[in-house]
Amino acid sequence: MFLSMPIKQGGLGLRPLTTQHMARVAVGANSMMTSMDCVSRVVADTTTLRKPLLSALEHFAVPAATKSAIREGKQNLFREEIAMLSETYQGSCLPSFKKGSLVNSWLRGTGGMRSRDYITGLKLRFGVIETRSQKHCGHLSGHRETAAHISQKCPTTQATIIQRHKKIVNLVGDRAKREGFAVHVEPAIKSEDAVYKPDLVLVKDNTAHILDVAVPWEKGTTMHEKHERKISKYTILTKDVKALFDVQTYTVGAIIIGARSS
């Protein structure tokens, strides 16, 4: 079903050929039946065309095979498909990708990606990466070896997970340095009885900016919710950050990048 979702909602925008063919035959037959040409009307009344026309009317649940009626019937079917998909485990992540023009733009395949990376990305997004016949992770955790587990918590991929995180942090830090910021990576900030270590503290013009990075697995919640949790976590450090970095102003930000590109 992900294949038929519009790109702006995280799919590939591919409609089933059977549906498209049925709709076109029905509209064509209907046009012939209402044509001013006598021969066209006779041909349209043959069993060869009437049978697929009636099948289309039943399939799309419409009274007539006009373009507008068929279009509305297709939209109704599509809404039903989305509703069915949303109730499944795979479909539970749909809200994370909905209306994300930027995070879904790569699905068009025009971003200069290598073919194998594009295919792997599609498999990851749609949850169809091949798994072993042994469904559970080979470690003592007992977790199922799902793409989410491998991407987030598996001991075998822990080094790669950390590397992914640091790559984003370094990318942001390097850009900040070029913009004239003093960059502090994972500074220890003591507040009461706890110690916090945000990924980055950027200092410039008497202002300190905390930035924390996260690469969560999309489960249906929006990235805004994850962003707000990060902001809430570090907002309480206002006095401590001002004192530690000797600044007058303090801001908190977060960079949230979904593991499946949301």
Image: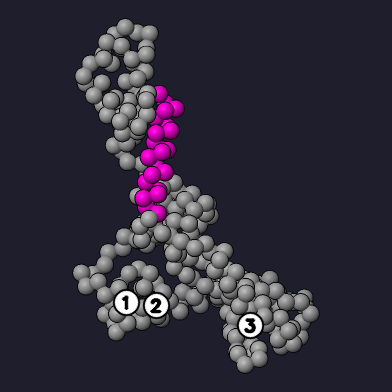
* The quadrant where residue 25 appears: top left
Say if the magenta span includes residue 63: no
Is 21 situated left or right of 153 in this image?
left
Compared across the picture, whether 109 is left or right of 177 comes to: left
Q: Which residue lies most toward the bottom here?
A: 193
What secondary structure do most residues of the magenta stretch adopt? helix
Is tag 2's residue or tag 1's residue first in the polypeptide sequence? 1
Residue 184 image label: 3
Q: Amino acid under label 3? A: His
Residue 49 x %, y %: 25, 21
Looking at the image, tell me whether mark 3 or mark 2 is earlier in sequence order: 2
Which region is colored magenta?
Answer: 66-86
Residue 162, horizontal then vertical, whole percent = 45, 79
Residue 94: quarter of image: bottom left
Question: For mark 2, what is the residue?
Answer: 153
Tell me the kind of residue under disc 2: Lys
Which of marks 3 and 1 precedes in the sequence? Answer: 1
Q: Nearer the viewer, mark 3 or mark 2?
A: 2
Separation of residues labelled 1 and 3 (CA atoms): 36 Å
SS assignment at label 1: loop
Task: Give the x, y percent position of residue 193.
Answer: 62, 93
Q: CA distance from mark 3 to mark 2?
A: 27 Å
Residue that numbered label 1 is attached to: 143
The number of numbered badges drawn on the structure is 3
Tell me the element at label 2: loop
**Marks 1 & 3, CB-CB < 8 Å contact:** no
Q: Within 10 Å of the Cα at label 2, are there few (<14), some (14-19), or many (20+) other Cα atoms?
A: few
**Is there a contact, CB below 8 Å, between mark 3 and mark 2?**
no
Q: Is residue 141 above or below residue 257?
A: below
